Amino acid sequence: MSHPIRHLRNVRLDDKLQAQLEPFINAHRPHESTLNRVQLRREFGPPVSTITPLSFKEICKQVKAL
């Protein structure tokens, strides 16, 4: 059985209705395959072992610097 959202594929929708349904339509569209570990490292570099937490003051300083 086909998913009901697929029946909207060839339907012409009102612009407002299309905007309202967009999150649901995008959720059920075909997605690209995920990257494997080698591709992830090639694209983003090695994984970070720790993430340094930022204090609220540090975040405020960064915002003011922008």
Image (cartoon, rainbow, N blue to C red):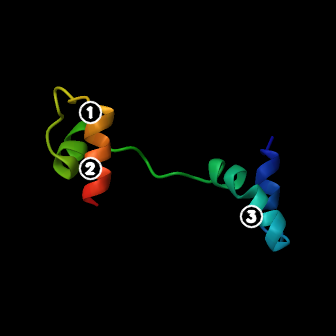
The residue where tag 2 is placed is: 62
Could you tell whether 1 is left or right of 33 in the image? right
Label 1 element class: loop
Please tell me which of labels 1 and 2 falls first in the chain. Answer: 1
On residue 54, the disc is: 1
Instruction: Give the quarter of the image for residue 21.
Output: bottom right
Q: Nearer the viewer, residue 15 or 26?
A: 15
Q: Nearer the viewer, residue 36 or 18?
A: 18
Q: Amino acid at mark 2?
A: Gln
Cα separation between marks 3 and 1: 37 Å
Residue 36 in view in this figure: no
Please tell me which of labels 3 and 1 falls first in the chain. Answer: 3
Could you tell whether 7 is left or right of 57 in the image? right
Residue at the spot x=66%, y=48% of the render? 28
Mark 1 touching mark 2, by CB under 8 A? yes
The C terminus lies in quadrant: bottom left
Cα separation between marks 1 and 2: 10 Å
Residue 31 is situated, as x and y percent measured from the top left of the image, at: 52, 51
Cα separation between marks 3 and 2: 35 Å
Q: Residues within 10 Å of mark 1 (few under 14, many from 20)?
A: few
Q: Amino acid at mark 1?
A: Leu
On residue 19, the disc is: 3
Label 2 element class: helix
Mark 3 touching mark 2, by CB under 8 A? no
Residue 50 is situated, as x and y percent measured from the top left of the image, at: 18, 26
Mark 3 touching mark 1, by CB under 8 A? no
